[in-house]
Image (cartoon, rainbow, N blue to C red):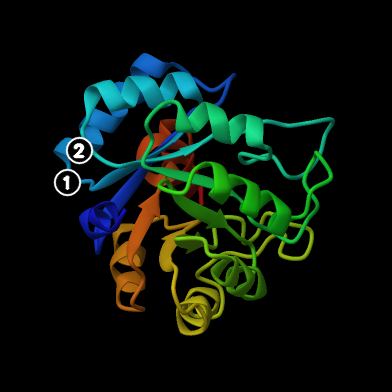
Amino acid sequence: MHQVLDQIKNGLIVSCQALEGEPLHSPFIMGRMALAAKEGGAVGIRANSVSDIREIKKQVDLPVIGIIKQVYNGHPVFITPTLKEIDAIADTGAEIIATDATNRIRPDGKSLEVFYQEVRSKYPHILLMADVSSVEEAIFADKLGFDIVAPTLYGYTEETKGLKIDDHDYAVIKQIVKEVSHAKVLAEGNVSTPEIARSVLDFHVHSVVVGGAITRPQIITKRFVDAMQK
């Protein structure tokens, strides 16, 4: 576990994800995307779905943060929401499993505390990552025993809708780093430029996760088009 954390320290983790209906949705393409990320110097990959994770593991020897986005009856908690998704990711050999660690009740009615204890009991040797939306949630996840916390869902819950991690001079990241005692803090969410990625490292985060700015060409293209039309 510590070896994986050392491997990703101060480095760039690239999120290689394309949902159904997006142009690059394909395990093959995500595998090649991960390979390109490795060649560019990435130290880890974040990936969604069993098929994508398995293909990525074939292409690169980097640590993988595995998630499964699964919506149950329109429930807002959908990042690795139940033990069923945890089991599926664990079977892929992903070194880290990330899950929604907000204060919302999960689709199966469990609290985060109960869910965490079940997962930790079943998989004591897999690193667990908490995707949170607030400083308070990060503190709670740290107290529970999560190995990694990240403000991945900052801006995506009812309480934080529309906010971005660079609002107010990255205050949310700075505060999480200050308040969390044991878990490693990853900067994730709206890291849209190399300059932002570099600047957040100065806040003593463990590593930085970048997704859309690298691996979603439709978003990258739109940024160019929008800028040119101003």
Left or right, 205 with reference to 20: left
**What is the three-letter code of the residue carrying label 2?**
Lys
Which residue appears at 53% of the width and 67% of the height?
165
Q: Which residue is mark 2?
A: 38
Q: Between 111 and 80, which is closer to the camera in this rendering?
A: 111
Residue 59, how many percent across, how many down?
23, 23
Residue 133 occupies quadrant: bottom right
Towards the viewer: 36 or 106? 106
Is 136 placed above or below 49 here? below
Q: Position of residue 226 (x, y in %)?
A: 50, 45
Residue 85: give x, y in percent of width and height.
Answer: 60, 31
Residue visible at 70% across and 59% down in the picture: 113
Q: Which residue does the numbered mark 1 point to in the structure image? A: 41
The CA distance from mark 1 to mark 2 is 5 Å
Left-right relation of 22 to 147: right
- The percent coordinates of residue 83 (x first, y second) are 65, 36
Residue in front for this viewpoint, 205 or 90: 90
Secondary structure at numbered mark 1: loop
Side of 185 where 207 appears, left or right: left
Label 2: how many Cα within 10 Å (few below 14, some 14–19, many 20+): many
Q: Is residue 151 above or below residue 91?
A: below
Q: Residues within 10 Å of mark 1 (few under 14, many from 20)?
A: few
1 and 2 marks in contact (CB < 8 Å): yes
State the SS at label 2: helix
Quick check: 207 above or below 83? below
